[in-house]
């Protein structure tokens, strides 16, 4: 009782009278006099309660309540309300509802699940490891199922990419059998059939092994064409002025090789080693051994007058120079047994009187140019002058 009396006395103090009057005036104002808000905002995760849906105007101070939409649930500690505040605006909505979780799906054997979120509306994708392909949907969406949420597609599975049985070959076989299941990475090796003694053997042409792989559509394919088994025979190869170092024969089959060298005084044109190919031919072609020769004749400002040949071995040739050039050495030279020219190949030099004439011509041209230049410069430097007396007489007239 005493505290009630003290409270009443406190309200009756002079400072409280204006405040009390203001409160009474606000209480007596008609509803909506302080302003109002329009329809509350539409939220993606919640909707208004039924009693607020039909209204179009809400006085300042009004509070409306939302319910979480299907697929969403309340967030603890967050109020599901909005209030019409001063200036007739609704309070800022908070995330008081969040999507329900579909939960983590099972692990995907031989594959991966790519997850960014597990809540309602999220999407997950699936992929398989190398050598496997996806059977089923490659995505799944978290959707509503009654009052709960669930993934809209079953978990797919990854199967090993299969290949058809490897192709058979004529006169040969592969390492697989009819009961083998071939999948990505499987390998088979081919071999040729054996033949009776004294019969030409089969050679395996191509890659001995192929493996199961896949194309861009993840269909199983073999890595290449199977090899062939065929009889390959290359003819015996001989080189004139040369001899074999290896591969003496007498018969030659696929991938057999021969190496050659030339006899003294000869040089090899082509490859020193040749290999028997599947087309029964040698590759590179059989080389030749050519006789060693003197160096080619290269004569500046001259030519070979007599004895010209493509190659020189022990030959004599005569050289002459072009007009206006002179030869200080011997015009006839000899290719010796040491494959050198003796005497040395001569040089053709410009004659002395030609040089003197050229110097005189150049000097004359330079002199003429100098004289023409001085003459033109002196004429441009002269000026025509008129005496002052002539000018005065003309004015007087």
Image: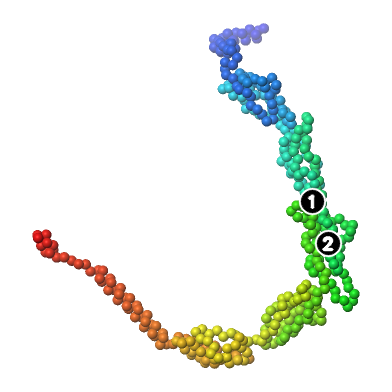
Quick check: can you spot residue 344? yes
- The image position of residue 364, as x and y in percent, is 34, 80
Q: How many marks?
A: 2
Question: Which residue does the image show at 28% across and 72% down from the upper left?
Answer: 376
Picture quadrant where residue 279 is located: bottom right
Location of residue 72 with respect to 307 vertically, above or below:
above
Residue 369 as seen in the image, left or right of residue 15: left
Question: Which residue does the image show at 79% across and 50% down from the upper left?
Answer: 133
Location of residue 69 with respect to 393 vertically, above or below:
above
Picture quadrant where residue 105 is located: top right
Question: Which residue does the image show at 27% across and 74% down from the upper left?
Answer: 375
- Identify residue for label 1: 132
- The image position of residue 38, as x and y in percent, is 61, 22
Mark nearest the camera among 2 and 1 is 2
Residue 178 as seen in the image, left or right of residue 56: right
Question: Which residue does the image show at 79% across and 66% down from the upper left?
Answer: 207
| Mark found first going from the N terminus, 2 or 1 | 1
Location of residue 6 with respect to 126 vertically, above or below:
above
- The image position of residue 88, as x and y in percent, is 58, 22
User: What kind of element bears circle 1?
Assistant: strand
- Identify residue for label 2: 167
Rounded to the nearest whole Å, what is the CA distance between mark 2 and mark 1?
A: 23 Å
User: What kind of element bears circle 2?
Assistant: loop
**If the image is split into quadrants, where does the N terminus sit?**
top right
- The image position of residue 82, as x and y in percent, is 65, 24
**If the image is split into quadrants, where does the C terminus sit?**
bottom left
């Amino acid at each position: 009782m005493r505290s009630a009396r003290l409270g009443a006395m406190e309200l009756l103090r002079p400072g409280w009278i204006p405040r009390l009057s203001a409160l009474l005036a606000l209480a007596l104002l008609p509803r909506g006099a302080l302003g109002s808000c329009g329809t509350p905002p539409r939220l993606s995760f919640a909707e208004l309660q039924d009693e607020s849906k039909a209204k179009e105007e809400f006085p300042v101070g009004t509070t409306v309540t939302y319910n979480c939409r299907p697929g969403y649930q309340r967030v603890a500690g967050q109020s599901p309300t909005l209030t019409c505040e001063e200036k007739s605006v609704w309070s800022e909505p908070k995330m008081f509802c969040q999507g329900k979780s579909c939960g983590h799906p099972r692990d995907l054997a031989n594959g991966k699940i790519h997850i960014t979120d597990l809540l309602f509306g999220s999407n997950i994708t699936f992929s398989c490891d190398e050598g496997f392909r996806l059977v089923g949907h490659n995505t799944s969406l978290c959707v509503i199922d009654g009052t709960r949420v669930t993934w809209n597609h079953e978990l797919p599975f990854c199967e090993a990419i299969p290949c058809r049985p490897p192709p058979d070959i004529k006169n040969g076989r592969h390492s697989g059998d009819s009961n083998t299941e071939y999948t990505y990475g499987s390998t088979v090796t081919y071999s040729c059939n054996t033949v009776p003694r004294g019969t030409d053997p089969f050679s395996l042409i191509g890659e001995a092994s192929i493996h199961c792989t896949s194309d861009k559509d993840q269909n199983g394919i073999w890595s290449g064409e199977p090899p062939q088994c065929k009889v390959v025979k290359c003819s015996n190869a001989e080189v004139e002025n040369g001899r074999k170092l290896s591969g003496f024969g007498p018969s030659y089959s696929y991938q057999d090789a021969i190496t050659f060298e030339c006899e003294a005084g000869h040089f090899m044109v082509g490859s020193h080693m040749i290999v028997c190919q599947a087309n029964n031919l040698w590759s590179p072609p059989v080389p030749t051994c050519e006789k060693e020769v003197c160096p080619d004749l290269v004569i500046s400002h001259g030519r070979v007058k007599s004895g010209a040949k493509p190659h020189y071995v022990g030959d004599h040739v005569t050289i002459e120079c072009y007009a206006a050039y002179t030869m200080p050495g011997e015009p006839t030279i000899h290719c010796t047994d040491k494959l050198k020219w003796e005497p040395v190949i001569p040089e053709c030099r410009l004659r002395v009187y030609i040089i003197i004439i050229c110097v005189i011509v150049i000097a004359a041209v330079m002199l003429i140019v100098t004289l023409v230049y001085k003459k033109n410069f002196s004429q441009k430097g002269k000026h025509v002058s008129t005496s002052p007396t002539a000018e005065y007489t003309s004015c007087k007239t």
